[in-house]
Structure formats: C-alpha cells, structure tokens
Image: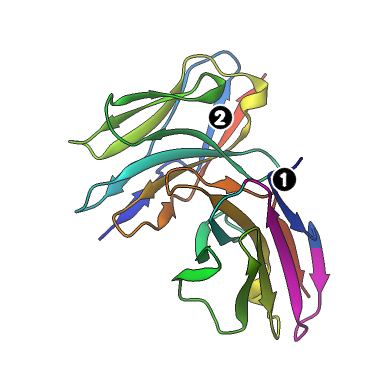
Amino acid sequence: DTAVSQTPKYLVTQMGNDKSIKCEQNLGHDTMYWYKQDSKKFLKIMFSYNNKELIINETVPNRFSPKSPDKAHLNLHINSLELGDSAVYFCASSRSRYEQYFGPGTRLTVT
Amino acid sequence: AQSVTQLDSQVPVFEEAPVELRCNYSSSVSVYLFWYVQYPNQGLQLLLKYLSGSTLVKGINGFEAEFNKSQTSFHLRKPSVHISDTAEYFCAVLFGNEKLTFGTGTRLTIIP
C-alpha cells in the first residue's frame, strides 16, 4: 500500500532518446508535483498539477512534458535526452500546500 | 529576494551527542517552514513543520525546531542522536507564491 509510487526506479538511456517516468498516488490528493534533484542534492520543483490542471511550470526545457491522465497519476515525458538531464526525479502529492508526500525517486542516467 | 540557506553541507556528530542543523531564510512575505529528511536511496519524508502558533515545533524521531522571526531562522535540533539518524536533512520554505523552496541540504553523519 505504497502512498506515492514511481516507475521505473532506475533508468539508463542514451542521449537523444525519449523516455517517460510514471507516478501514481493512492492518497486521494488533488495536487501532484515533479521535482529534480541534481548530483549535489539540490531539489527544485519542475511542475505542479491540481486536479489535472497545470498550476506551476518552472523554467524547464520544452523537452520535458508532464501529463496527468487523472488526479492519481502524473507522468513525465522527456524528449531528446541530454547528459544534463541525469538526476533523480521525485514525484510528490499533497492535499494541502502544507505537507507533501514524496515518492522513492527515479534515478535517470543519460550516457 | 526569497531564499533558503543551509550553511552546513556536512555535520558529523558522535552517537548520543546533541545536534543542531541550521536553516536561515530571506523573505518579505509571510512564510511557512518545514524540515524534510532523506534517508539513503529514499524519497523525502516530512520531519516537522511550522505554520503558526508556538515557535517551538516537535516532530518525528525526537527532532524539534524553533522558529525565530527576528533572526529569520528555523534550526533543527535533537538532544541525542542515533546511528539511524544518518541522512540528508532539507529545510524548506513555502513563500507567498505557494512554491516550496528547498535549501541545499545538510548531510548528518553519526559517528559510533
């Protein structure tokens, strides 16, 4: 009964490829997020969706496109992967803005 | 400008000793303050939060933090650490725009 789950846990791919990361939450939350954690552990928000609508869209390359098919899912698709995209990507969800629940992360390595 | 600063990137502490992890912020709007913990190869877990009321906040695993408005600080403390406290600790601030901003993290290493 994992609260926020992500697949895959690890993703190794070559430059130029297109890949997706999936996120699902079973907490009944309305808001979901994607964060990027770089090699220095710095965490930065990328996107936020509320009830399937995009509410936060940080300065992220157009190659990154979030998709929310329903309230419980928020997927992240990345086109034309670059070396600098290597990071750990975290999905999170929240009912209120005062507590976010994080998934276990997806470690993306671009070679 | 709004920012979150964790001055210590690494803090080594002997087991059963007290620890304080520092967090300062800069803001011209009201803030809500959080500490998250990230154990190795895991996601982040909320330790505690300050929204309003008493400035001393108690969280899970024996941690507490004190909000000091005049010093714009929200330092995390534990009176006696355990090996299992080894982790990365992130201070986070919710500024008026509802975007959670994280500090750069402090790696707490417990020495047996």
Query: Which coloring applies here?
Result: rainbow
Residue B87 percent location from the top left of the image = 62, 35
Instruction: Identify the residue at horizontal 28%, vertical 26% (top origin).
Output: B55
Q: Quadrant of residue A73?
A: bottom right
Residue B10 percent location from the top left of the image = 53, 39
Q: Secondary structure at mark 1?
A: loop
Residue A61 percent location from the top left of the image = 54, 81
Crowd rating for badge 1 (residues with CA inside 10 Å; few <14, some 14–19, many 20+)? few
- Pointer 2: what residue? B12
Image quarter of the C terminus of chain B:
top right
Q: Chain of mark 2?
A: B
In this picture, residue B98 sits left or right of residue A43? left
Dot 1 amino acid type: Asn
- Pointer 1: what residue? B41
**Magenta stretch: residue B56 in it?**
no
Q: Secondary structure at mark 2?
A: strand
User: For the residues tagged 2 and 1, is the chain the same?
Assistant: yes
Instruction: Identify the residue at horizontal 81%, vertical 74% (top origin).
Output: A13
Image quarter of the N terminus of chain B:
bottom left
Q: Which residues are magenta?
A: A11-27
Instruction: Identify the residue at horizontal 63%, vertical 30% (top origin).
Output: B86
Q: Earlier in the sequence, mark 2 or mark 1?
A: 2
Residue B29 percent location from the top left of the image = 21, 52
Say which of B86 and B68 sits in front.
Answer: B68
Q: Is residue A62 above or below residue B91?
A: below
In this picture, residue B80 sits left or right of residue A18? left
